[in-house]
C-alpha cells in the first residue's frame, strides 16, 4: 500500500448526505491514505460584539450535528487504515486572494468539488464555497454526488442517511 | 425567615457595611490631611516671620506685606523666637515649660518639628540669619479648621448615612418584591395544578430570564408528568381490555356449551375454542411478566461478549422461520475493519429478542415492502438501524409507543399486543443503550438501537 498521506479539501454543508463524497473518494482510491478538511462557507457578522467573541469552535459546535459526527465515526471505523483524520474549516470570504492564501498555507494535495449535490445551507449564515475553490493552482476533481429523489426527499440529516437505505 | 425579609436584611447589611466603611475612610483621610496641611501653614508662617524679624534686609517690606495682606491671623496664633546660645548648643530646660522637650529636640536635630498639645498645634524651624545668628522660630495656633470643618464633615456623613439607610431600606424592599413577586406568582399557579387539571401550564414570556426558564422547566416537568399519567391510564385501560377479551370469549364459550346438553364433538369444539383463547391469555400474561422482569436492574441476567453482526444474522434467520421470504436488506457496507468494535457486553437472548421485535414490527407494518437493517460503529457505540417504508406512527401517538399494550390508531388491521416495543426498550436500557424511534405516518419508521461497545 502506498502510505503517502493526501491532504484533501472538500466543501461541505455539514449534512450527513455530503459525507458520501468521502466514501466515494476512499472507495475510488483504495491504496491511498487521506487527511480530510471539510470547508464550510460562513458569513461573518459585521457586528463588533460578534467579531469580538468570534469562536470557530463554538460556531462549528452549532453547525455540526451529533448525527453528522456519528456518521463520520462510522466512516472512520470502516476505513480505519485509509481515513487518517478529519478537520473542519470555516471560510469567511469568497475573496480570491483570501482563498488563494488559505490554500497556499494549508498545502492541500487535492480539492474535490461535488457535482449535482443538493446543498442544504442555512443561507442566513452559510453559503456554498465551491465556486471560490474552482480556479486554484491545486489539482481539482469533480465527483458526482446525486441521490435518488426518495433519498433526497427523506434525508433528514439523520445518521441513517449515511447508509442510503 | 421569609425570603422577602431575608433579601431586605442582606441588602441593608451589605449597603450599610459598605457605606460605613466608605464614610470612615473619608473621615479619617480628610482629618489626617487637615493636620498635615495646618502644620505646613504654621511652618510657612515661621519662615516668613523669621525673614521679617530676624533679617535686616530690603525684602522686609515685601514679607511684611505678604504677612499683613495675605496671611489671615490664625486663632490664638503666636510666634516665638528663641535664640540659640553660642549659635550651636541650647539649654532645653529654659524653654521646656512652654514647649515639649521632644518637639524642641526634633527642631534642633531635624531642622523642623511639629506637635499637637491640647488642640494647639506647634510648628517650629531652626533659622540662621545672614549675621550667622541661629534661632528657633516656633509658631503656635489652634486648629480652628479641624474643629469646625471635620465636625461639619462628621455631621454631614452621619446625616447622609441615616438618609441612605432609609433609602436603602426602601430600595431593598422594592428589589426584593420585584424579585420575589414572580416566584410567588409561580407558586400560586403551581398550587392550582392538580391531578385533575394536569393540562394547565404556567405562563411564560419571551424574556428567557431565570424566572421564565423556571416556568418553562416546570412546564416541561408537567408535560412529563401528564404523559406519565396518561401512560398509566392507558396501561390500565389497554391491559384490562386485552386481558378481558379472551376471558370474555372463554366465559361465553363455556356458558354456551353448558346452556344445554350437547354431544361430545360439540363439547370438544367448544373446549378447543376455549383453549385457543386461554393460550392467547397466557401469551399476553407471559409477555407482561417478561416485561416486568426486564424492568428490573438486570443483575440476574447473564451477560457475555456478543458479536452484533452475527446476532443480526441470527435474528434474520429466526425471522425467516416465522415469516416466509421476508424482504430484508442487510446493509453491512460500513462494517468496521476491526471486528473487536462489533462486540458488546450483553445478554444474547434478550438482545436477540429486542432486535427480533423491531424487525418483526418493521416487516409487519410494511405490507411486504423492503425493510433495511444497517450497522454502523462510532468511537463508543454500535448503531443498529432498522428502516421500513410502512404505515408509520401518527405524530400525536408517538409519545405513547412505549406504553405496555398501547397500539397506534392505524394498527387495527394488524395483529399485536403492544408489548414488543416497551419490552425492547427495557432490554436496551438494561444494556445501557438508547432506543430512538422516528416515524412519519404513511412514510415509514426508523428505529435506532445504540449499544455501548464492550
Image (cartoon, rainbow, N blue to C red):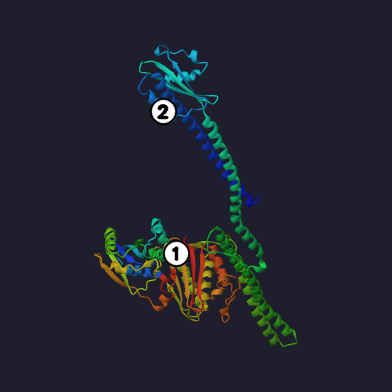
Question: Where is B240 relative to B217, above or below?
Answer: below
Q: How many residues crowd around disc 1 within 10 Å: few (fewer than 14), some, or many (20 or more)?
A: few
Residue A66 is labelled as 1
Q: Report whether residue A54 is seen.
A: no
Image quadrant where residue B237 sits: bottom right
Helix, strand or loop under label 2 = helix
Residue drawn 38% across and 66% down?
Answer: A126
Above or below A47: residue B39: above
**Where's residue B102, x and y in %?**
49, 19
* Residues at marks 1 and 2 touching, judged by CB atoms closer than 8 Å: no
Q: Nearer the viewer, residue B160 or A26?
A: B160
Q: List x then y, in percent, for residue A45.
A: 38, 62
Mark 1 and mark 2 on one chain: no
From the viewer's perspective, tell me whether residue B366 is left or right of residue A113. right
Q: Residue furthest left?
A: A137
- The residue most toward the right is B260
Which is in the foreground here, disc 1 or disc 2? 2
- Quarter of the image where one finds residue B212: bottom right
Please rate how many residues cluster around mark 2, counting C-alpha atoms within 10 Å: few if below 14, some from 14 to 19, many from 20: few
Residue closest to the eye, A63 or B6: B6
Q: Relative to residue B119, is residue A30 drawn left or right?
A: left
Specify the label residue B66 is tagged with: 2
What chain letter is assigned to the residue under label 2?
A: B
Q: Where residue B82 is drawn, which disc sits there?
A: none
In the image, B187 versus B18, the foreground residue is B18
Instruction: Give the chain letter at badge 1.
Output: A
Would residue B436 be visible to someone looking at this image?
yes
Estimate the x, y position of residue B347 in percent, counting from the top left: 53, 64
The number of discs equals 2
Query: Residue B246, image x and y in percent?
Result: 66, 78
Secondary structure beneath label 1 = helix
Distance (Cα) linking label 1 and label 2:
87 Å
Amino acid at each position: 500500500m502506498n502510505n503517502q498521506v493526501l491532504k484533501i479539501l472538500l466543501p461541505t454543508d455539514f449534512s450527513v448526505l455530503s459525507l458520501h463524497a468521502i466514501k466515494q473518494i476512499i472507495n475510488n482510491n483504495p491504496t491511498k491514505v487521506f487527511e480530510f478538511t471539510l470547508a464550510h462557507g460562513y458569513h461573518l457578522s459585521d457586528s463588533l460584539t460578534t467579531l469580538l467573541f468570534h469562536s470557530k469552535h463554538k460556531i462549528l459546535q452549532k453547525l455540526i450535528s451529533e448525527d453528522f459526527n456519528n456518521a463520520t465515526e462510522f466512516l472512520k471505523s470502516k476505513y480505519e487504515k485509509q481515513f487518517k483524520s478529519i478537520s473542519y474549516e470555516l471560510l469567511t470570504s469568497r475573496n480570491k486572494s483570501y482563498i488563494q492564501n488559505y490554500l497556499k498555507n494549508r498545502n492541500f494535495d487535492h480539492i474535490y468539488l461535488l457535482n449535482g449535490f443538493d446543498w442544504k445551507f442555512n443561507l442566513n449564515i452559510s453559503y456554498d464555497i465551491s465556486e471560490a475553490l474552482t480556479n486554484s493552482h491545486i489539482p481539482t476533481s469533480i465527483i458526482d454526488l446525486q441521490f435518488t429523489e426518495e433519498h433526497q426527499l427523506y434525508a433528514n440529516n439523520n445518521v441513517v442517511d449515511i447508509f442510503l437505505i | 425567615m421569609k425570603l422577602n425579609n431575608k433579601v431586605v436584611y442582606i441588602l441593608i447589611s451589605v449597603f450599610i457595611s459598605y457605606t460605613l466603611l466608605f464614610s470612615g475612610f473619608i473621615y479619617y483621610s480628610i482629618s489626617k490631611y487637615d493636620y498635615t496641611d495646618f502644620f505646613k501653614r504654621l511652618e510657612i508662617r515661621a519662615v516668613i516671620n523669621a525673614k521679617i524679624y530676624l533679617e535686616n534686609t530690603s525684602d522686609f517690606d515685601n514679607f511684611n506685606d505678604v504677612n499683613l495682606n495675605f496671611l489671615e491671623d490664625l486663632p490664638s496664633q503666636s510666634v516665638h523666637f528663641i535664640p540659640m546660645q553660642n549659635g550651636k548648643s541650647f539649654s532645653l530646660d529654659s524653654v521646656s515649660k512652654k514647649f515639649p522637650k521632644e518637639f524642641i529636640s526634633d527642631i534642633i536635630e531635624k531642622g523642623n518639628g511639629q506637635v499637637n498639645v491640647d488642640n494647639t498645634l506647634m510648628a517650629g524651624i531652626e533659622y540662621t540669619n545672614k549675621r550667622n545668628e541661629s534661632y528657633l522660630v516656633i509658631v503656635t495656633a489652634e486648629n480652628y479648621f479641624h474643629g469646625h470643618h471635620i465636625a461639619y464633615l462628621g455631621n454631614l456623613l452621619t446625616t447622609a448615612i441615616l438618609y441612605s439607610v432609609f433609602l436603602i431600606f426602601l430600595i431593598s424592599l422594592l428589589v426584593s418584591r420585584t424579585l420575589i413577586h414572580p416566584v410567588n406568582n409561580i407558586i400560586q399557579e403551581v398550587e392550582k395544578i392538580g391531578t385533575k387539571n394536569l393540562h394547565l401550564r404556567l405562563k411564560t414570556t419571551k424574556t428567557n430570564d431565570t424566572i421564565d426558564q423556571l416556568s418553562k422547566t416546570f412546564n416541561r416537568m408537567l408535560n412529563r408528568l401528564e404523559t406519565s399519567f396518561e401512560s398509566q391510564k392507558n396501561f390500565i385501560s389497554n391491559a384490562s381490555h386485552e386481558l378481558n377479551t379472551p376471558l370474555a370469549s372463554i366465559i361465553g364459550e363455556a356458558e354456551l356449551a353448558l346452556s344445554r346438553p350437547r354431544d361430545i364433538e360439540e363439547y370438544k369444539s367448544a373446549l378447543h375454542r376455549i383453549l385457543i383463547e386461554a393460550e392467547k391469555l397466557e401469551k399476553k400474561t407471559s409477555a407482561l411478566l417478561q416485561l416486568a422482569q426486564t424492568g428490573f436492574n438486570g443483575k440476574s441476567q447473564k451477560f457475555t461478549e456478543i458479536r452484533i453482526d452475527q446476532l443480526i444474522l441470527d435474528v434474520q434467520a429466526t425471522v425467516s422461520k416465522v415469516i416466509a421470504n421476508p424482504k430484508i436488506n442487510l446493509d453491512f457496507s460500513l462494517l468496521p475493519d476491526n471486528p473487536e468494535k462489533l462486540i458488546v457486553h450483553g445478554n444474547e437472548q434478550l438482545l436477540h429478542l429486542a432486535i427480533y421485535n423491531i424487525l418483526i414490527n418493521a416487516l409487519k407494518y410494511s405490507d411486504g415492502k423492503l425493510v433495511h437493517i444497517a450497522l454502523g460503529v462510532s468511537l463508543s457505540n454500535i448503531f443498529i438501524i432498522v428502516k421500513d417504508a410502512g404505515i408509520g406512527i401518527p405524530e400525536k401517538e408517538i409519545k405513547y409507543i412505549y406504553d405496555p399494550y398501547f397500539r397506534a390508531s392505524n394498527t387495527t388491521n394488524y395483529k399485536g399486543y403492544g408489548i414488543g416495543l416497551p419490552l425492547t426498550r427495557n432490554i436496551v436500557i438494561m444494556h445501557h443503550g438508547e432506543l430512538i424511534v422516528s416515524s412519519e405516518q404513511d412514510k415509514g419508521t426508523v428505529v435506532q438501537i445504540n449499544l455501548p461497545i464492550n
